[in-house]
Image: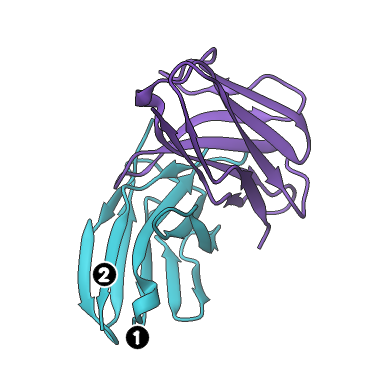
Chain colours: A cyan, B purple
């Protein structure tokens, strides 16, 4: 199936720094979801986006639905050690259709 | 957010045996559930879409006779790995679609299957 490209593949940052990651697709999507996965656990939903240009926050996390509808961005401000994990984007082009998942961004926060 | 549970969280079995994994939506009714497989350090791979009261839809390359899916109620879907072999060892994760409104899906905690 289709896979979304996430960038960067991995990040190593100092605690307190801001983080930016993005997800791109060759297809237009109507819905973008962002998840965080800890080792040995299922992904946890962070933010859902439903409209092009939409900007949504969840605490220190902010995500945007790209205006072209082919990309999405996730920012984490003032990172802390518990932000460590793998972040996945997921896109869907029509209700009832499956979500396609990104390749993941592994985040390491150095105290 | 909505809560999805999976049982068991870990299972070790002998080659040739069958293993059943349960996925439950605890606080909502899910007409659609999804089963994923995840290899170490990789993304989630959709195996099949499970619809309540009808046959599951399998992704290309997934053997439906190998991975039996049953979605008998609005809160329970099961995945049975039949005649398991070591190459079936993996992390299996289910998700459930929240009905109504905007489309969102929530994941279970996953099941680690090890086939000896």
Determine the image quadrant of residue B94: top right
Q: Residue B110: x, y in percent?
A: 52, 46
From the viewer's side, name the closer residue of A80 and B83.
B83
- Of tags 1 and 2, the one toward the viewer is 2
Count residues near mark 1 (Cα–Cα under 10 Å), then give few for <14, some for 14-19, many for 20+: some
Residue to which mark 1 is pinned: A78
Determine the image quadrant of residue B37: top left
Q: Residue B41: x, y in percent?
A: 29, 47
Q: How many marks?
A: 2
Horizontally, is A7 left or right of B101 in the view?
left
Query: Measuring 44% from the left and 75% from the top, which residue is drawn there?
Result: A61
Q: Indicate which disc residue B20 carries.
A: none
Query: Measuring 43% from the left and 66% from the top, which residue is drawn there?
Result: A64
Residue B31 visible in the current orientation: no
Q: Is residue A56 above or below residue A40?
A: below
Q: Residue B26: x, y in percent?
A: 74, 52
Q: Chain of mark 1?
A: A
Does dot 2 land on a helix, a strand or a loop?
strand
The CA span between labels 1 and 2 is 13 Å
From the viewer's side, name the closer residue of A66 and B72.
B72
Earlier in the chain: of badge 1 and badge 2, it is 1
Query: Measuring 24% from the left and 57% from the top, which residue is drawn there?
Result: A7
Q: Chain of mark 2?
A: A
Does dot 1 land on a helix, a strand or a loop?
loop
Residue to which mark 2 is pinned: A108
Q: Residue A96: x, y in percent?
A: 62, 37
């Amino acid at each position: 199936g289709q896979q979304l490209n996430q960038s960067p593949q991995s990040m190593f940052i100092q605690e307190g720094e801001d983080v930016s990651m993005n997800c791109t697709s060759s297809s237009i999507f109507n819905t973008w979801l962002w998840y965080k996965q800890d080792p040995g656990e299922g992904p946890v939903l962070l933010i859902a986006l439903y409209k092009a240009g939409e900007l949504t926050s969840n605490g220190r996390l902010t995500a945007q639905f790209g205006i072209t509808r082919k990309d999405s961005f996730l920012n984490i401000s003032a990172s802390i050690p518990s932000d460590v994990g793998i972040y996945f984007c997921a896109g869907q082009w029509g209700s009832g259709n499956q979500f396609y998942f990104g390749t993941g961004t592994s985040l390491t926060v150095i105290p | 957010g909505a809560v999805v549970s999976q049982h068991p969280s870990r299972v070790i079995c002998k080659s040739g045996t069958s293993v059943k994994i349960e996925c439950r939506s605890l606080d909502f009714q899910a007409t659609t559930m999804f089963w994923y497989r995840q290899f170490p350090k990789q993304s989630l791979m959709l195996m099949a879409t499970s619809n309540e009261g009808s046959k599951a839809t399998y992704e290309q390359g997934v053997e439906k006779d190998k991975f039996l899916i049953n979605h008998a109620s609005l809160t329970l879907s099961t995945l049975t790995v039949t005649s398991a072999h070591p190459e079936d060892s993996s992390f299996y994760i289910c998700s459930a679609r929240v009905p109504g409104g905007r489309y969102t899906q929530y994941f279970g905690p996953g099941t680690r299957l090890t086939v000896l």
